[in-house]
Amino acid sequence: MSAASRTSWRLIDTGLRPAAENIAINRAMLEARQEGLIPNTLRFLRFLPSALVGYHQCVEQELRTDYCTAHGIAIQRRVTGGGAIYFDETQIGWELYLDRRTLGTADMQEISRRICEMAAAGIRRLGVDARFRPRNDIEVDGKKISGTGGAFEGGSILYQGTLLIEFDVEKMLRVLRIPAEKLSDKAIASARERVANLKDLLGTSPRREAVMQSLARSFAEGFGVEFEPAAEMNFAEREKFHHALAEIDHPDWIDLVSRPLSEAPLVEGLHRTTGGLLRVALGIDLPKNRIKQAWFTGDFFVNPRRMIVDLEAALRDTPLDELHSTVDGFFRSYPVEMLQLRPADFVQTIENALASLAGAPLPMAGGAPS
């Protein structure tokens, strides 16, 4: 296809910003794309030092908030799923805001693969052998150099990734709530062996402009488009940005997912899946053998995002012997997209929590939903 006949998409660099502003721009651009107020867009961004949790995660579970506060590291919640990350000026973020029809598929796993393959091609232009690693990472020689994730808004998608130019592994480990034994010199050295950055691989930090140009070129080739640079957001985006910032730069948003208050005994369980880590806290009515309350968190990706809240509502006051049928019925009637997750994974997570009541698996009636 000749350059003259290619579709034009927008390219914008919103620069170095506080976490709240970057997340508010996510909300603004995704809504604007859904409403047809902006074209398909590639955005580049950078963060002041920030600790970001995924949409479905609990800050208390994932971050050392005292360390973040003491070191001037902002805490924020993303609009996308996935796990907690540390972000600073040495990383470059990229984001695609697209009409979903552009992708020709509704499959979350295929969307992730296609976009990550394009991003990996852009990183290879810089001189390193970057490759896609399912479910949503990009690696060089087995070491992670980029993590990605997405969110949907009606017929539009935000898909985003980070690229490590330089990286302070020790600070990342101290920001994340991990066991103290993993902060030893040996553990930190081991973590460094699992993460790659461009400075170490190339011997010097590439210019930001060169990194952005390489990524943009590969996205342009992958989608068969050309990019038109824009100096700033348009009026509609700026209006949406200011409205979103008022909500996002607030404790209610940051603590959107928090530990439930329950008079019933709380038991907790977790289940590792190919689609991420699922956690659940259950309030149990022991005399009646009922789930009074369920609270799911984790680094997974689902669409729509409110599915988790609706599943929690469906499980309220559910008899334990009706767990399988309740979850099965919920997913049969609820249109949802999940990245490498199955309904049975939610059942297993609950059963793992219930097992802690007696120290052994509890018998459950009915078969597991698929």
Image (cartoon, helix red, strand yellow):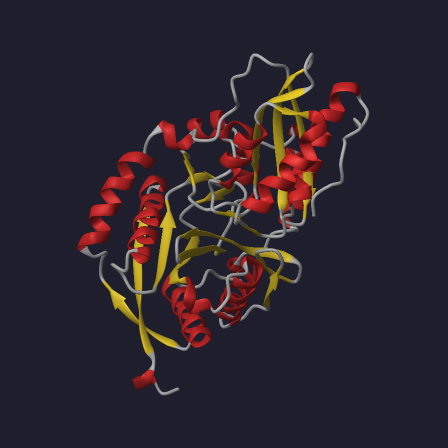
Compared across the picture, whether 360 is left or right of 176 comes to: right
Query: In screen coordinates, is 228 left or right of 348?
Result: left
Is residue 185 among the parts visible in the rendering? no
Camera sees residue 76: yes
Residue at 68% across / 32% down in the picture? 323
Quarter-of-image position of residue 88: top left
In-front residue for pair 51/60: 60
Coordinates of residue 104 in the picture (x, y in percent): 48, 69
Residue at 43% x, 42% y is 78
Total number of numbered discs in the rendering: 0
Q: Position of residue 113 (x, y in %)?
A: 56, 64
Q: Is residue 288 above or below residue 82?
A: above
217 vs 243, nearest the viewer: 243
Q: Quadrant for the N terminus, please.
A: bottom left
Q: Is residue 67 above or below residue 131?
A: above
Most foreground residue, 76 or 208? 76
Which residue corresponds to the image point at 76% horizontal and 32% vertical from the top-left?
Answer: 365
Looking at the picture, does residue 263 appear above or below residue 240?
Answer: above
Pinpoint residue 203: horizontal percent, then vertical percent. 53, 62
Q: Position of residue 329 (x, y in %)?
A: 61, 40
Q: Nearer the viewer, residue 279 or 308?
A: 308
